[in-house]
Image (cartoon, helix red, strand yellow):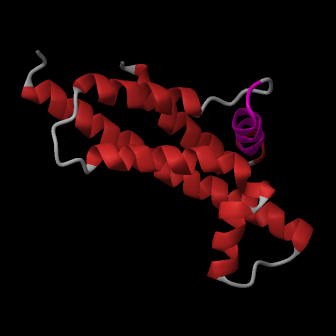
Amino acid sequence: MPSDSSSNAKMQQLRTVRKKLLALHKALLDSEKGIYEQFYGRIQTTGEYFRLVTSHDWFSWLRPISQFIVQMDDVLHAKEPIAPETIDQLLQQAEQLMQPDAEGTSLNKRYLHAIQRDPNIALMHADFTRQFASQ
């Protein structure tokens, strides 16, 4: 049975990964918004932007990240103790989800393209992946 300090360390790592993933997700959304506006014109309101992010094909590749962040939030805010294996699985999923790959899923391909076109996203990706180097 893992110690409480081990479980606490895993929860802290999950919090850190979530924080970095959330910042990366926001940067990806901002980047995609800029490109979207070059093609379709300025997004006029926050409501219109929210509708586009949640329903337009342009932003669909980012939805798995949004859904995964919600999964992480559910674990982080659970009232019951969370098994260390569940945390390990989430950390593994986070690492696998954010893999830039020209041959992968739509998310993998578009993420690679975002990294290549935006140095800020490239730096954030490097920082995000460092979270998994010590595992």
Q: Is residue 4 above or below residue 53?
A: above
Q: Is residue 32 above or below residue 129?
A: below
- Which quadrant holds residue 88? top left
Q: Is residue 13 above or below residue 36?
A: above
Q: Residue placed at 49% from the left, 43% from the top?
A: 68
Residue 107: within the magenta?
yes
Left or right relative to 133: residue 86: left
Residue 120: within the magenta?
no
Q: Residue placed at 77% from the left, 65% from the top?
A: 34
Q: Quadrant of the C terminus?
A: top left
Left or right relative to 104: residue 24: left
Residue at the limit of the structure toward the right, as seen here? 39
Residue 67: x percent and y percent? 52, 48
Q: Quadrant of the N terminus?
A: top left
Q: Is residue 87 above or below residue 34?
A: above
Residue 39: x percent and y percent? 91, 66
| Nearer to the camera, 13 or 66 | 66
- Which quadrant holds residue 38? bottom right
| Nearer to the camera, 123 or 39 | 39
| Nearer to the camera, 131 or 101 | 101
Q: Residue placed at 79% from the left, 56% from the top?
A: 58
- Counting every numbered tag in the picture gives 0
Residue bounds of the magenta highlight: 104-114
User: Principal SS element in the magenta part?
Assistant: helix
Residue at the limit of the structure toward the top, as seen here? 1
Q: Residue placed at 34% from the left, 48% from the top?
A: 74
Residue 12: x percent and y percent? 25, 39
Residue 7: x percent and y percent? 17, 29
Left or right relative to 50: residue 22: left
